[in-house]
Image (tube, grey):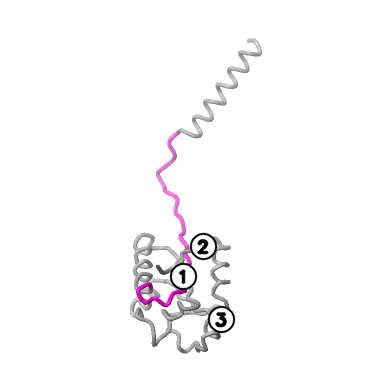
Amino acid sequence: MNNLTKYLLAASAIVALLHFLFFSPQNTTAPEKRQHRIVFQLTTPDTAAYRALTRQLNNVLAHWPGAQLEVVAHNKGIGMLLKDKTNVQPEITALKNKGIQFIACENTLKQQNLEKSQIVAEAGFVPVGIAAIVERQEDGWSYIKAGF
């Protein structure tokens, strides 16, 4: 066998191997189980956006029941978590019972002269809302800007 024949056989083997690797059917017996983690940023005072967000959270959980979801409210979005201003208190309670975390920004509370006691009981707190969102993204969480 001459060198040209050896070269052509080797090239044919490489092409066959590449074809097998890229075009053969993948194993579909056990789909990969992904863990969905999403942080929602809420900055709007629009109460219609609060209702839309609660619907979206329920929709995500219906599609991915095991998803980890957090809502970080800061700036004007803190209204969703204010006891005397929220229009979605029952929804917050129900979503919290499904495992969704609601987070209030302590910087926003200071800037707006609000007390932690004014925030719904279902919510937790972070010192800096934007920093909490960035840290989630750095940890691989997906980011969604809530509102219209």
Q: Judge the density around disc 2: few (<14), some (14-19), many (≥20) Cα neighbours within 10 Å.
A: some
Left or right of 111, for residue 96: left
Residue at left offset 38%, top offset 70%: 53
Measure how far apart labels 1 and 3 are at the Cα level: 18 Å
Measure how far apart labels 2 and 3 are at the Cα level: 23 Å
The tag earlier along the polypeptide, 1 or 3, is: 1
Q: Are marks 1 and 2 in contact (CB under 8 Å)?
A: yes
Q: Nearer the viewer, residue 147 or 99?
A: 147
Q: Secondary structure at mark 1?
A: strand
The tag earlier along the polypeptide, 2 or 3, is: 3
Residue under pointer 1 = 70
Q: Where is residue 32 shown, x and y percent of the image?
A: 45, 50
Name which residue type carries label 3: Asn
Q: Where is residue 100 shown, x and y percent of the image?
A: 42, 71
Residue under pointer 2 = 141
Examine the rendered structure and indicate whether residue 1 appears above or below residue 119: above
Magenta-highlighted residues: 24-49
